[in-house]
Image: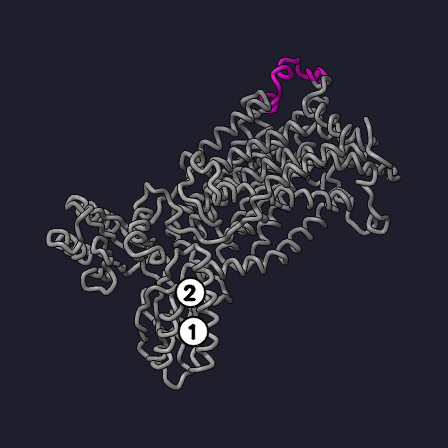
Amino acid sequence: MATFLHRLGRFSFRRRRLVALLWAVVLAACAFAAVKAPTAAEDGFSMPGTESQKAFDLLDRRFPGGGSDGAEARIVFVAPEGQKVTAGANRAAVERIVADVAAGDQVKAALDPFSTPGAVSRDGRTAYSTVAYDVPNTDLTDATTEALEDTAKAGREAGLTVELGGTALVPENELGGTTELVGVAAAAVVLLITFGSLAAAGLPLLTAIVGIGVGVASIVAIGMSTTTTTLALMLGLAVGIDYALFIVSRYRTERAEGHGAEEAAARAVGTAGSAVVFAGLTVVIALAGLAVVGIPVLTKMGLAAAGTVVIAVLVAITLLPALLGFCRRAVRPRAARRAPAGGGHARRTGDDRPGAGTRWARFVIRRPLAVLVLGVLGLGLISVPALDLQLGMPGDEAKSTSTTQRRAYDALADGFGPGFNGPLTVVVDAKGSADPKAAAARAAKRLAATDGVVATTPPAFNAAGDTAVLTAVPATGPSSEETTDLVRTIRDEARGLRAETGATMLVTGTTAVNIDVSQKVTGALVPYLALVVGLAFLLLMVVFRSLLVPLKAALGFLLSVTAAFGTIVAVFQWGWLADALGVEQTGPVMSMMPIFLIGVVFGLAMDYEVFLVTRMREAYVHGERPGAAVVTGFRHSARVVGAAAVIMIAVFAGFIGMSDPMIKMMGVGLAAAVLFDAFVVRMTIVPAVLALLGDRAWWLPKWLERVLPRVDVEGEALTTGGAAVPAPATEPATGPVRV
């Protein structure tokens, strides 16, 4: 591996104009394809095999042309305090607004609240009109959405409070907003402080931008959605900067040791580039493994992000050495640039003084047990809130109160009760029943008599008369435990209905989907962890030629991810720091978040494991004792790993400013996970464990040593002219090591 990448780095350096031109052509081609691609539809949420999905599929088959794919809007009218919406002037204003909307383009129907049963609240102060469109929300024209917003303004001018909700209100695309720019600006500052050179700080940013440009443009070109693109942008930017950071840092080290620019670039790609390739592979495994869950939208997100990470790796090992050829001296420290060219080994100013990383490593290996206990207990304490983790699918109630969707949600809850925003859709498949109408009537009677149901609609049959749809309104809100219990109760009653009438009753709707997602994710968690951790364990075993180092890496990941879950629960459920982070409504954590966070965090955690421990392994195989190897690894890598972690935290934290609750939650969770994993697990617990294990950390059975392929991540072949350096004797040491 190191030899191949060494040759690739040398080729890219020598043919830098050709390599740069090829990447420019690729970027331009992808951008052109993205511009010409049609607007992508938002991913439909589907969960094959669940009861909710079976109900949706049944509705599509039995009610063809029902307009289930069309956009929908809900106009909510609230009369001033002390008045009723049914009063003369207020009623006239509502009817005029509904008529104007119904006459608009792309509108299929707009229901008059005064002729629609249940569309006016009992106190007469609140009413709503449902507007159905002929096309999905992505196909609505600007004129259509503007007409909807204008009618709301007209209602407000008439003295009514008018708010809008529904899928017709397409959220603004937040890609390229100020949140991402904040992350990039923070990364630039960290890079400048780390390298002390504008060129060295600029190269990782430039290559990361090229990588995400190619990746995101490719995703848009093939028709993936905005949510998928946002995730790819988030991860592509973070890993793109980090991967380039490690290679540029290694290039500077090789130059400081006296190598020429071309050889230094080749060696940087051969050594740090090897670590980048394997770190990228762990991220790709974790992201692609999301397909195991069986939720299509999660699979798309994982595969798109994995593709962007692959592009980031390719950019780092090809375009970056080419760019180093254009600024071979400019990326070096200022003192090295002042030294005369060709003067042999460059003077390494300050390198002989122990830095903060070296001092910290020496502190840890002198007190490994105490540091290990404190680190584990600290993360364990932060993880405690995770015991109260509640899953759900946040909707308009999780949006900011500055949005009309959230205000419409609150107005409906105040006027019609908390359960109105989360009605249950009950589908009665009476095809196998002798009397479909009697079966549907019995189902309606059972629903009306169920505790927790405050209202039901009469059965509505399809044209064939073999399928009916009913709506049940719960007494409690969509995310409450009582509503979850109600769904389970209705599904239990469906068994009795089938036994009595032969009809099948299926329950769907927001709360039913929440339950099904939670069950599906929980059921897929163990297979997913087994697949991802198992493959990554094998990969790390090949990289480090050890059994205990990959095991330690996996256990450290569990500490990081549980602490990240604790942070998410504390912020989004308990409300800690909610105001500071812009979280205006606490509630359940999105159902897909646990398995998504596990996948992404595992990949990123292995990044830092590979980058940090590879330098320790490199020192160890070249003859240093275990404790000295830990210190050497920190001396070369601690500052860069710390800078990379700060950059990734800054990038993820930049997404906290987005209005989308899922993206905001992802930003908080990923930023917290990187903080815990990089600074507590990898830079504190890892050296403590290695110090306690001593030589045993690098032990590998001889039969396994013969079986495993040798990939030479440490670049042994580069330092020995092609001959591998034999590993030091691995006699187990007793007790913690000392330096």
SS at badge 2: strand
Q: Amino acid at mark 1?
A: Met
Q: Which residue does the numbered mark 1 point to in the structure image? A: 505
- From this view, report whether residue 161 is shown above or below residue 463: above
Which residue is pictured at 21% across the width and 53% down the height? 125
Does residue 395 appear anywhere in the picture? yes
Question: Residue 591, how many percent across, how many down?
Answer: 50, 53
Part of the protein shown in magenta? 328-350
Please name the colour scheme applied to the rendered image.
Answer: one colour
The answer to which quarter of the image holds residue 454 is bottom left
Count neighbours of disc 1 (C-alpha within 10 A) and say few if under 14, some if 14 to 19, many if 20 or more.
many
Seen at 71% across and 29% down, the residue is 634
User: Does the magenta stretch mainly form a helix, a strand or a loop?
Assistant: loop
**Residue 574 percent location from the top left of the image:** 48, 43
* Disc 1 to disc 2, C-alpha distance: 10 Å
Q: Which mark is residue 508?
A: 2
